[in-house]
């Protein structure tokens, strides 16, 4: 047999072995999208709890009356690099502690066979410090798998009452960013990705009594400053997926 044919047969064997070994040691995971709210079109209006376009969303804008703390509007996103067409616009008009507009997202049920689930948020903070946004991957400080804070141009993870905040990175004012949090359900750990880059190692859930993530609460600003109804947070996409 000519030498070049022998070489070809040897390469085919090596390629077959590599492909088989790849199937054995790196199986593909099936990703399933549970929710994808992506404001690719320029919608206009104020988000209320009767807005039929977004049945998974609940606007929290006051304790005594609607819009007491501010509003969440659906409108045109600010221009800039990779800017989307539309966004949820969080407008703040209170300086009280623990008072500020928030968006609560009902997370669709993750399947019992899911090993990981991800929540991705495309966002922009348009105000200078002092500022503090709090993203509860759950309901509140105690009933969440993790809590991510945005304050003084930093991103931090909350590890519990007695644990110091752990710095994850930095954000830039008036710039679009992407936050992705991946939850490992069997291990009860999570990983944070900021603009596509993984930030540190896996971290344990803040509350290990939880076995899943059922809600997402995006609290726009609890800094002691009244922004007089000006925007303090933009969110253009909320995407939730699972892998089996």
Image (cartoon, rainbow, N blue to C red):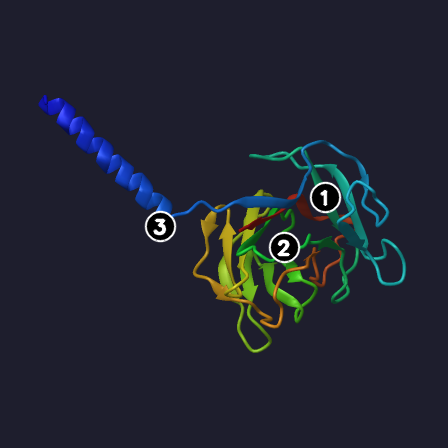
Q: Residue at x 58, y 71 (%)?
A: 208
Q: CA distance from mark 3 to mark 1?
A: 42 Å
Q: Position of residue 100 (x, y in %)?
A: 76, 59
Q: Residues within 10 Å of mark 3 (few under 14, many from 20)?
A: few
Between discs 2 and 1, the one toward the N terminus: 1
Q: Residue at x 62, y 54 (%)?
A: 111
Q: Which residue is nearer to you in this view: 235 or 116? A: 116
Q: Residues within 10 Å of mark 1 (few under 14, many from 20)?
A: many
In the picture shown, does residue 97 fall above or below 29?
below
Query: Disc 1 marks which residue?
Result: 88
Q: Of tags 3 and 1, which is closer to the observer?
A: 3
Instruction: Tell me if label 2 and label 1 are in contact, CB under 8 Å.
Output: no
Q: Which mark is residue 110?
A: 2
* Displayed quadrant of residue 145: bottom right
Mark 3: secondary structure = helix
Asked whether residue 48 appears in the rendered view, the answer is yes
Q: Of tags 2 and 1, which is closer to the observer?
A: 2
Q: Of tags 2 and 3, which is closer to the observer?
A: 3
Query: Disc 3 marks which residue?
Result: 25
Between discs 3 and 1, the one toward the N terminus: 3
Q: CA distance from mark 2 to mark 1?
A: 25 Å
Left or right: 12 as drawn, with respect to 119 = left
């Amino acid at each position: 047999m000519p030498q070049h044919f022998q070489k070809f047969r040897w390469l085919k064997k090596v390629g077959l072995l590599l492909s088989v070994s790849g199937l054995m040691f790196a199986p593909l995971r099936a990703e399933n999208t549970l929710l994808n709210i992506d404001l690719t079109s320029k919608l206009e209006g104020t988000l209320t709890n009767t807005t039929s376009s977004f049945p998974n969303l609940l606007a929290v804008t006051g304790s005594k009356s609607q819009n007491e703390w501010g509003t969440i509007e659906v409108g045109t996103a600010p221009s800039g690099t990779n800017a989307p067409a539309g966004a949820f616009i969080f407008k703040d008009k209170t300086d009280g502690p623990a008072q500020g507009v928030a968006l609560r997202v009902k997370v669709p049920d993750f399947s019992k066979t899911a090993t990981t689930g991800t929540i991705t948020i495309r966002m922009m903070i348009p105000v200078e410090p002092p500022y503090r946004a709090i993203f509860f991957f759950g309901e509140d400080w105690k009933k969440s798998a993790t809590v991510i804070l945005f304050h003084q141009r930093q991103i931090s993870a909350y590890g519990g009452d007695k644990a110091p905040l752990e710095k994850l990175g930095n954000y830039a004012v008036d710039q679009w960013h992407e936050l992705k949090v991946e939850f490992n359900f069997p291990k009860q750990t999570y990983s944070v990705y900021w603009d596509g880059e993984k930030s540190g190692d896996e971290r344990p859930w803040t509350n290990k009594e939880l076995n899943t993530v059922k809600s997402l609460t995006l609290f726009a600003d609890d800094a002691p400053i009244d922004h007089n109804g000006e925007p303090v947070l933009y969110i253009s996409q909320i995407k939730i997926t699972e892998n089996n």
